[in-house]
Amino acid sequence: MRSSLALAAAVLVALSGAASAKSKTQIVSLDGHCDVLTLKIDKTSVAGTDDPDCAEGFGAGFIGKVKGFGNAIVAGVQFAEEPGVQLVLRVQYPLVTGGSWDLSATSDGVSFSEIESGTYTVQGTAAKGAKGSTPVIGVMRK
């Protein structure tokens, strides 16, 4: 019994290591904003964070085909600066510099509206810096 539990644990550890080996990290900056997104992509799922020097945001979502938009990453996003607001980020995929993105929001679960859109730049590292001085969620406060 102990040897089968140890074997099962070893298989689980090996499988989790193999799954993480297939994921990749991509850095994307939203043009005209200070938002630099670090995205961990694993086949069809995505998790990501925004540069904390810009806006403290995080989210998770999926890659798929969106009618009228094409292939995209679609993720629910939360920002500390906007409590009570659910945001949805849609990013054209595969990731290529000049691709498009949009951000929509709801605060009541009934009405849903686009608050900002634009293009993005794919970067090799977050250290390349931001393209603008305000976060994309800053648009909501205007």
Image (cartoon, grey):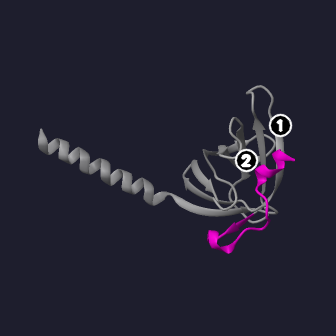
Q: Amino acid at mark 1?
A: Ser
Could you tell whether 22 is left or right of 138 in the image?
left
Q: How far across and down, in percent of the image, does residue 6 sit?
A: 18, 47
Residue bearing mark 1: 113
Nearer to the camera, 17 or 132: 132
Question: The N terminus is located in which quarter?
Answer: top left
Q: Residue at x 56, y 62 (%)?
A: 25
Q: Residues within 10 Å of mark 1 (few under 14, many from 20)?
A: few
Q: How far across and down, in percent of the image, does residue 100 sit?
A: 79, 55
SS assignment at label 1: strand
Q: Which mark is residue 80?
A: none
- Residue closest to the far top: 110
- The boundaries of the magenta stretch are 121-142
- Residue closest to the far right: 142
Q: Which mark is residue 90?
A: 2
Q: Amino acid at mark 2?
A: Arg
Q: Residue at x 73, y 68 (%)?
A: 130
Could you tell whether 76 is left or right of 99 in the image?
left
Q: Residue at x 72, y 59 (%)?
A: 35
Nearer to the camera, 81 or 60: 81
